[in-house]
Amino acid sequence: MPEIEISIGGRTFEVACQAGEEHYLHSAAKMLDDEAQVLAGQLGRMPEARVLLMAGLMLADKTAGVEDKLREVTGLLAERDAELAQLREMPAPEAERIEVPVIPSEVTDTLAEIAARAEALAATVAEKTAG
């Protein structure tokens, strides 16, 4: 079990931790030291135990606030998950039937034939009136 040195409030402490957790312990010690420095700046010289107690309480207060926010966000996520599950369970909407009128090919063929006859008649009339 590794032992590391941490500094809190200007004092150095040797602390043991699990292998691989050194980074977390350094991070936690820095947070505690930062709070202790704030207290020392505000209140001046205090007994070591009191500084550590107050710094720990300040961190606990911050942690409680973060946990409250986390619970709130978790609740919102749970609501969204429930809504999503409800939407997924809903049956798919019925397909809407859209009818598009289709002109039978016989009609278009007949219209094309009528148009061709009309053009031929128009050409015949144009020739007779011109000539």
Image (tube, rainbow, N blue to C red):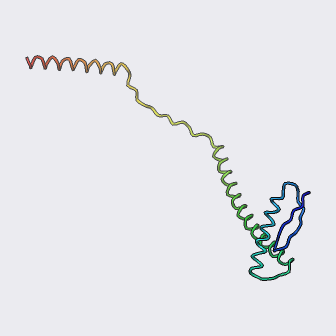
Residue for point 77% across, 73% down: 35
Q: Which quadrant is the C terminus positioned in?
A: top left
- Place of residue 26 in the rendered image (x, y in percent of width and height, measured from the top left): 81, 63
In the displayed structure image, the side of residue 61 where residue 16 appears, left or right: right
Percent x, y for residue 102? 40, 26
Q: Is residue 88 above or below residue 26?
A: above
Quarter-of-image position of residue 19: bottom right
Identity of the residue furthest to the right in this view = 1
Q: Quadrant of residue 9?
A: bottom right
In front: 17, or 76? 17
Q: Which residue is depicted at the point 29% across and 20% down?
A: 112
**Which residue is at 84% across, 58% downward?**
22
In the rendering, at what x and y percent does residue 31 appear?
Answer: 77, 67
Q: In the picture shown, does residue 53 fall above or below 29?
A: below
Quarter of the image where the N terminus is located: bottom right
Q: Is residue 49 above or below residue 88?
A: below
Q: Residue at x 31, y 19 (%)?
A: 110
Taking the image as shown, residue 111 lies to the left or right of residue 73, namely left
Residue 111 is situated, as x and y percent measured from the top left of the image, at 29, 21
Image quarter for residue 114? top left
